[in-house]
Image (cartoon, rainbow, N blue to C red):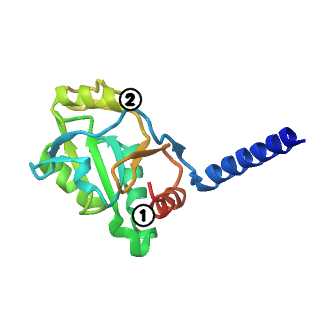
Amino acid sequence: MIQTTRRLLLSTLTVLALVACNADKPKFNAIDITGADYAKGFTLMDQNGQNRSLSDFKGKVVVLFFGYTQCPDVCPTSMTELAEVKRLLGADADKLQGAFVTVDPARDTPEMLKAYMANFDPTFVAFIPTPEQLAVVAKDYKIYYKKVDGKTPTSYTMDHSAGSYVYDTQGNLRLYSRYGVGEKVLAQDIQTLLKTIP
């Protein structure tokens, strides 16, 4: 009888512990990659010629996208959506940091990236890796990119991964948001992160 009671008590405590764990875990629309052992950050030159790291933005949710300024569709769409996400955040708008890493450092000069970011939001930061740095960062972030030749040497395009990485206010990698999820869905995930204590 005592053993049965003890087993019942242990089973009840186990269930309660599992329920408590699940109750504390936030629900996201994006892919939850909390604890991933990649995409830990980098230090690269920004569009203003300063070396910056993702850790410089602690206190903000960082949404990081890889692309290039001459991208015809995916990049401007993603950056426009991110600017709209910021608007949707309302009073929490200043807690979002948009970040962009060019996969076309040969053409994307600081001046071009400064103008490009200003088209979406002047607070967004663009990072310009050297070709060698890009290879290292792309590998660490599991990002695909490839030059596709055009009709002339300068009219090439870049194939590249199209999702975004999302970091919480403590600089921890938390989410991978697929391309095309929409600004309302991403804004909801960011609001969830802002309410979550890491």
Q: Position of residue 145 (x, y in %)?
A: 34, 28
Eyeballing the image, is 55 above or below 190?
A: above
Question: Which residue is depicted at the point 47% across and 42% down?
Answer: 34
Q: Nearer the viewer, mark 2 or mark 1?
A: 2
Label 2, secondary structure: give it: loop
Q: Position of residue 131 (x, y in %)?
A: 18, 28
Residue topped by disc 2: 142
Disc with the residue nearer the chain's start (2 vs 1): 1
Q: Is residue 36 visible?
A: yes
Left or right of 36? Residue 100 is: left
What amino acid is at disc 2? Answer: Lys
Query: Would you call the spot at circle 2 few (<14 residues within 10 Å), some (14-19), or many (20 or more)?
Result: few
Query: Would you call the spot at circle 1 few (<14 residues within 10 Å), some (14-19), or many (20 or more)?
Result: some
Q: Position of residue 153 (x, y in %)?
A: 19, 26
Q: Position of residue 94 (x, y in %)?
A: 32, 68
Question: Which residue is depicted at the point 78% across and 47% down?
Answer: 9
- Residue in front for this viewpoint, 48 or 21: 21
- Residue in front for this viewpoint, 31 or 16: 16
Question: Which residue is depicted at the point 10% across and 49% down?
Answer: 50
Left or right of 181? Residue 120 is: left
The answer to which image quadrant residue 155 occupies is: top left
What amino acid is at disc 1? Answer: Glu
Residue topped by disc 1: 84
Q: Quadrant of the N terminus?
A: top right
Question: Which residue is depicted at the point 35% across and 44% down?
Answer: 65
